[in-house]
Amino acid sequence: MNPNQLTILELLEHPNVSALVPLENKQKIIEYLNANQQKKKEPLYIRALIGAGAWFASFFLLLFVGLCIGFTEEKGAIVFGLGFLVAAVFIEKNAKALFLEQISLVLAISGNILFVGGLAVLFDDHEILIGLFLHIMVCCAMYILFNNSFYRFIAPLGVVIIAIVWVYDSRTFEITHIIVLLEMILVGILISLKKPSSFFLPLTYAAYLMFPSTVLFISLFGYLHIYNGSWGNMWNSSVFICCGLIWLFIKLAGGNKKIKEPWMILLVISTIALGAFSTPGILVAIGLLVLGYAFDDRLLTMISYAFLITFLILFYYSLSANLLEKSLMIAGSGFLLLLVRWIASRCEPKESLT
Amino acid sequence: MADPNIDKPVDIKTLRKLLQEGLLSEEAFLEASKIIRPISNWFAWAKKTLLLVGCGLVLSGVIFFFAFNWAAMGKFFKFFLIEFGIIVCLIFSYIKDNKSLTSKILLLSASVFVGVLLAVYGQTYQTGADAFGLFIGWAGLIFGFVLVSEFAALWLIWLILLNTGLILYWQQVGQFSFSLSYEYLCLSLAILNGIALTLREIGLQKGLIWLEGKWLRSVLLITILVNLSIPTIDVIVDIGYRQEVSSLLSLAWLAAIGGSFYCYRYKLRDMISIATIVMNVCVILLVFIGKIMFSNNYWEGGIFLSYSIIIVGVITGAVFLLKFIARSMENEEKEVPK
């Protein structure tokens, strides 16, 4: 019997699984799957349509507020912003109609921008840093109170965007490695949650997107010589991400008992080699690729392929070598990967070949 | 009637949901995932990924190698190396089972090398040919490979070459020699990609399984709609001098919307394509409404507030329509006797 074609009932009757699932749970599983079939999640294209529409609408709403109170009036912005945020939460909790739910999303986005922007501008010298802390507080509060997946996805991304702007503005580029470490820890926590609910799902996808994006910005800062961008400055992030990747491989393989397997040793050595000779971005993209396959998540897989190609191009483009040396390095890397593929075939456990 | 969820093959996502709900213990989850996704699946996936990325890097390296070595290498050595690469790829593609991914990637590599050969030929002999000739010629020479490959990605590359050739033809010849406006380019691109999409759908109906990836349909549909939407928006916004053909293209846009909606709603039943069409209509509709509202050059705050609400209204309407269509399609599928 092809294991890829087993139904849930056949899987529950499998000798290895049957002993581990109590009889009452089997019935509950069937009831749960039936109930789940009835209430389907909103498709991604509908959420994308709603999100894009809300962004567009909030832009015009902000223009309206700007024209009413004047574009440089901070106190008015704070009042309107707070009012919009409260109204957004109130409408979302009480309205059932889709139109009103969308209005609440528009108010939430506009309110967030007005409140954080208006309050931050009051602090002349450190407005971006203050804005960052304010946005973190608003984001945390609204994440709990405002049950909208698009807002819950976009607001955490806003935290990282403001953080990167602050880093660029204040020229404290070393902080980016701490940001990368925190993002990596966040991803690790979210994928390790024993019982993640839909509450954390938008934050998880935001983390999947913010992590490689931050590394991309660090790489671009170095490439554009915005700071002393030799690759030596990237080693902090490389070490963190290398350790995180090895942890991920061990976790997905089933724990420490798999460490001595030949294929696991090959994997760890390849990861360390990649960490030493390439960029953290490539490591991040590989980690997301593995997660995408482990969770059967096509969207995550597409995002990771896009970032992998971007980081590969950036890596080779910024090498201090002439075109001949680069071409040999690129082709050599390709042959190395094909060699690793051949070695992996040799290391494949016998039980998987039978 | 059999419950669809229970009869479907179970996947990792479903197992994770059961773990999250506490219906499966962690031990049971690990055992179950080992059964439906054994280690051989992981190895197969890793080998496929390494093959794709490895071949991509090798190809890129070869292209950069030739980019560097124009002056240093003799012309016949250059031609020999590239043609050797083409022949080696073709031989190994033939030896490998043509259904395997390796064989298809080797054919794709050979197709890329043909382009390199044409570029080197043009550089060596300074033919003075326009760039569009390179791309059209490249597409023509690799057509045979594309036909036998049964590889949707290679078909897409072939279409990209044709599209690029068409754009360059318009830039280098059409615009200057015949004073063709950009609308003719948009119309040509829409027709080219429309034919490709039609052939793709016919091929899939005839049983060509290698065309079943929905991504190709989405890419072609978006390309067609974008090319027809740009002149339509130009008609609405009315910036500068407008060609009469723009109005024709607007009618073509309407026909494309109507035709593709009917096709994907009643014949092929694809919600993602229907959503793409609806989104495109929303954009055009909002541009039209915006043109009416902002045309008097007197912009007070109320107009922006009203437009903001109208945007929400249009999107709400679109979402209702999509949900209604999805429900209708589901009900129709349930009614079809098995």
Image (spheres, coloured by chain):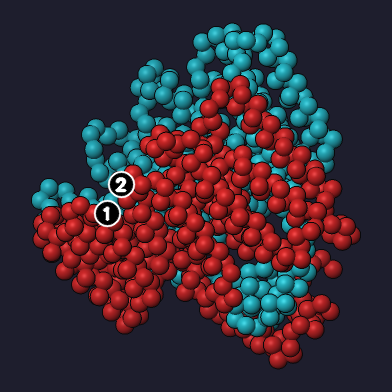
For disc 2, the marked residue is: A170
In what element is the residue under mark 1? helix
Q: Earlier in the sequence, mark 1 or mark 2?
A: 1
Residue located 10% across and 51% down the image: B298
Q: Chain drawn cyan, letter?
A: B
Residue A22 in the image: state x and y as whole percent: 74, 88
Q: Are marks 1 and 2 on the same chain?
A: yes
Q: Colour of chain A?
A: red
Residue located 79% across and 48% down the image: A344
Q: CA distance from mark 1 to mark 2?
A: 9 Å
On screen, residue B65 versus residue B272, left or right, reads right
Q: Are marks 1 and 2 in contact (CB under 8 Å)?
A: yes
Residue located 67% across and 64% down the image: A251
The chain carrying label 2 is: A
On screen, residue A48 versus residue B288, left or right, reads right
Residue located 60% across and 34% down the image: B158
Residue A87 in the image: state x and y as whole percent: 24, 75
